Image: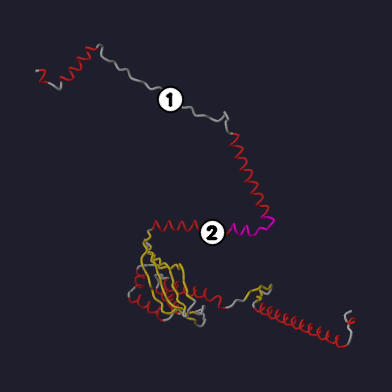
Amino acid sequence: MQFKSLKNIESSFRQLRLFGIVYLCACTLLVGYSVWKAYRFAEAQRQKIYVLDEGKSLMLALAQDLSQNRPVEAREHVKRFHELFFSLAPDKSAIEGNIQRALFLADRSAYGHYRDLAEQGYYNRVISGNITQRIEIDSVKCDFHSYPYDVVTYSRLSIIREKSVTERSLVTRGRLINSTRSDNNPHGFILESFRVVENRDLGYLTDKTRNDMKIKETFIRIKDAADDRLRSFCGALTPEKRLAAILILGALFAVVNFYMIFRAIYDIGRDDTPREVIEITPIEVPDFTGPDSQEEMVRGMEEFFNQFNPEEDE
């Protein structure tokens, strides 16, 4: 249609050239966009890993950047070191095994601290006194803005004896450096410049306090188990069953509520309700017999006062 309106060959050539340039640019943009989308799709597919489950089904697993997990691995490395180094049992082989495994995660500063405790006879007292030492990590703070990473660990030691438990506050410092992963060091860190900043007593726990704590922990476990069962039961319900359960519970609540309200209104002013009658007994006033005459009263008063004035009678 447009070519019919051309007046000469020169103008038609110009329009054909313009249409060709526009078409070439559009094709170039379309090809570039297609290549970019194909590259993005390939990158996304590289992050997906399909795992064969016992030769039956494929499960999709997503690959993540290793640097995203380094803070988590650093905290787990520090926690693991403290659990191995400070968890003690009254058994020489168990103590040496835990210390040896902990020294794979740190440099010679941790060995120096172990040597100081051994020279002071700390481990011998643990074995001879049948003492068990446990550690509970409260928090681990790592500074990942500078390398090596500064680490501060806040924890609590429980020194368990036969009849008492000693609680101690433990604060340690150190620095983390990257290392090669191995079976003995799965997170790929080394804790260097390890030192104990604070190790002070918090108090003693008697047998009664320990029993109360065990009872409290038992109640907490029962509560958590009931909560988990309720969550799993509710999670297994379909949306239709959830809606039906909500409607049934709402209807039951409404019926009970209306029953209590109408029952309270119905009982107002009823005569068949038992009434408690309080009987007040009259007060008995004793009879006071006075003197027969005024002269006897005056005479009695004189005799009374004469007892205190014997000189006047003489």
Q: Camera-side residue: 227 or 41?
A: 41
Q: How far from the left and from the top, in percent, is residue 107?
A: 43, 81
- Residue type at the position of mark 2: Asp
| Horizontal arrangement in the rendering, residue 222 relative to residue 306 (left or right) | right
Image depth: mark 2 or mark 1 in front: 1
Q: Which residue position is annotated with label 2? A: 224
Please name the residue that numbered disc 1 is placed on.
280
In the rendered structure, which segment of residues is drawn in magenta? 229-242
Say left or right for 277 vs 161: right
Tell me residue 57's x, y (percent).
69, 72
Q: Is residue 197 magenta?
A: no
Instruction: Please determine whether, in this image, residue 303 is positioned above or below residue 250.
Output: above
Residue beneath the point at 38% across and 60% down: 205
**Along the horizontal axis of the image, is 108 left or right of 24?**
left
In percent of width and height, residue 272 lies at 57, 29
Q: Is residue 235 magenta?
A: yes
